[in-house]
Amino acid sequence: MLTGDDTYYTILDKLTVFNLWTQYNQLTATSTDRTDFLGQPGIVNAWYQPELNSITFPAGILRPPFFHPEWPASLNYGGMGLVAGHELTHGFDDQGVQWNGVGALNPWMTDGSKKGFDDMAKCIIDEYSSFCPLKGTNYTPQCLNGENTQGENIADNGGIHSAFRAYQVHKNLNGPDAQLNERVLGQFSHDQLFFLNFGQVWCQMDETPDQYFRQIMVDPHSPANYRVFGAIQNFPAFRSAFNCPVGATYSPEKHCDVWVPKKTP
């Protein structure tokens, strides 16, 4: 226990001992502690834990650009709603489907469902492997590793479908929000604002070739821009919201259907 007489060294020593005991107790625990959120409340992140079949949303992410209580529903569902859908879909990605509802490693899919899932996952793997940010450079490989990133890509695609579907339910129950009284944002419909905030969440400075290469080699996430491009080109609702012609760059006729029936209008 810390006291007012502790020095920096004794504080560090006590915290080190506390953390070691905490980790030891986790390793030797005979039951699951579902009150442990496995992270700090102030960080801007969220995660799904297959061993617990649990999702954690720290307080740090419940703020702009993800969420604000006074924002219209379109922005909140396109931000925090997308994050929630993403984490939910992790329970049904290439790793999540191997764990059951109580967090035990016990695959639960039928043979037919497993075949359908494998076909869906292969479509995502092939699609994202065709994104080549380093094309024309001396780096090898030059394209994303669709196999390595499939879990996050499945979660991104399933997440945007879940969030948009939840947003539509919200509109049906509560009615649509009024058009924004703002010079720029007032030009967009709320369906368009949903997708704009989805893109805003992943907005960042363009990566250097070195950064792309490192991410391709070690990161299970696709680069931010491809997380956006891949998800919207697989979602016909984006095409409808912005009146994109079929066959346009981000509105291809053939696309991957992730946890939705094929040939969704």
Image (cartoon, grey):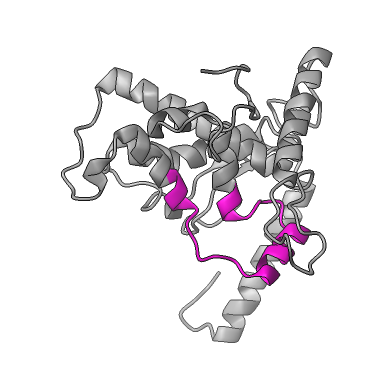
Count of marks placed on residues:
0
Report whether 10 appears left or right of 178: right
Query: Residue at position x 72%, y 27% from top?
Result: 120
Residue 160 lies, in percent from the top left, at 51, 34
Q: Quadrant of residue 186?
A: top left
The image shows residue 168 at horizontal and vertical percentages of 38, 23
The reply, left or right, for residue 224 in relation to residue 51 is: left
The residue under the point 48% across, 39% down is: 82
222 magenta-colored: yes
Determine the residue positioned at 63% across, 26% down. 257
Q: Looking at the rendering, which quadrant does residue 96 occupy? A: top right
Q: Is residue 70 visible?
A: no
Q: Is residue 147 above or below residue 91?
A: below
Residue shown at 54% from the left, 65% from the top: 206
Magenta stretch encompasses residue 246: no
Magenta stretch: give its range: 198-226
Q: Can you say whether 249 is above or below 236 in the image?
A: below
Which residue is nearer to you in this view: 156 or 212? Answer: 212
On screen, residue 224 versus residue 62, left or right, reads: right
Residue 15 locus on image (x, y percent) = 61, 71
Frontmost residue, 74 versus 22: 74
Quadrant where the N terminus sits is bottom right
Q: Nearer the viewer, residue 156 or 40?
A: 156
Q: Nearer the viewer, residue 264 or 38?
A: 264
| Image coordinates for residue 209, horizontal then vertical, percent | 67, 69
Can residue 234 be seen here? Answer: yes
